Amino acid sequence: MKILIIEDEPKTVAYLQKGLTEQGYRVDFAFDGVNGLHLAETSDYDAIVLDVMLPEIDGVALLQQLRLKRDTPVIMLTARDGVDDRLKGLAAGADDYLVKPFSFLELLARLQAIMRRGRSESTMIVIDDLQLDLVARRATRAGRRLALTAKEFSLLAVLARRQSQIVSKTAITELVWDINFDTNTNVVEVAIKRLRAKLDGPGQSKLLHTIRGMGYVLEHRPEDAA
């Protein structure tokens, strides 16, 4: 899932980018209202973290313009704790409001909450007895939670969103790692092996399949029961 941070304090941006990236989110950022509005209007984001005090265009004006075109969930940040400031942000279309300084875990919980409200119809994926909550970034199989790393969950989500479709190694590196690896590297194979070990346990039907020379596919095949 992809988050946009619009904030003019580089330290705050670095703090949020690091925390969100570690949680497996892809992050874009802008340091002023003009660039932030452009990104928000022209790219698809699952949520936006928006500071009120911005150069060029302030956060409230930015959000008012954005709401004419997009309904992306937005959480606003401000150093001011005044009721009027909160009301202005909420009236402009903010989904939530957080006062600085704040705990990253609180921000993360609120982001997950607004994304779940905004996209409840598409945040859960079910494949056989596998369930993925894309907002909470939680996967369970037969009711048992899978202990996945952030990258393993991202890899599983990429495959699950394309259920029964072959996903190439190149596509995986771009979607999960957001870069192009040397085609000779085995990072994808290693990641697939680790994910499969956690996903397909003894006595369970195999969900993660390798299509030689083409890529990988996630799907339920009853005949492949272990």
Image (cartoon, grey):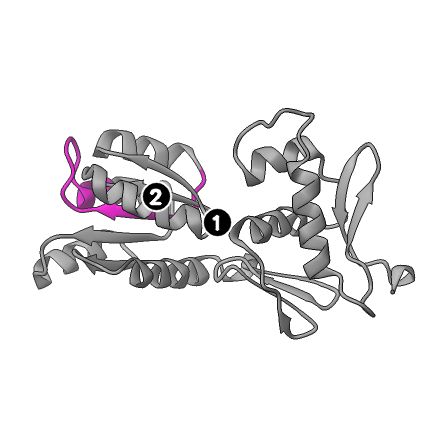
**Res 180 → quadrant:** top right
From where the camera sits, is residue 24 visible?
yes
Place residue 80 in its image quadrant: bottom left
Residue designated by label 2: 17
Dot 1, crowdedness within 10 Å: few (<14), some or many (≥20)? many
Residue appearing at x 12%, y 53% in the figure: 79
Number of other residues with Cα within 10 Å of mark 2, as a class: few under 14, some 14 to 19, many 20 or more: many
* Coordinates of residue 48 in the picture (x, y in percent): 34, 47
* Residue 52 percent across, percent down from the top left: 17, 46
Where residue 66 appears, as percent x and y from the top left, is 30, 41
Q: Is residue 143 left or right of residue 67?
A: right
Q: Residue at x 13, y 43 (%)?
A: 53
Amino acid type, mark 1: Gly
56 part of magenta stretch: yes
The reply to whether residue 72 is in sight is: no
**Element class at badge 1:** loop
Is residue 25 one of those drawn in magenta?
A: no
Q: Residue furthest right?
A: 223
* Quarter of the image with the C terminus in it: bottom right
The residue at which mark 1 appears reads as 24
Q: Start and end of the magenta stretch?
A: 44-62
Q: Which residue occupies the foreground of this view, 220 or 118?
A: 220
- Residue 186 lies, with reference to residue 125, above or below; the image says above
Image x and y of residue 116, in percent: 45, 62
Q: CA distance from mark 2 to mark 1?
A: 11 Å
Q: Are marks 2 and 1 in contact (CB under 8 Å)?
A: no
Tell me the tag on residue 91.
none
Instruction: Of the two numbered discs 2 and 1 on the same chain, state the one appearing first in sequence.
Output: 2
Image point (48%, 62%), residue name = 136
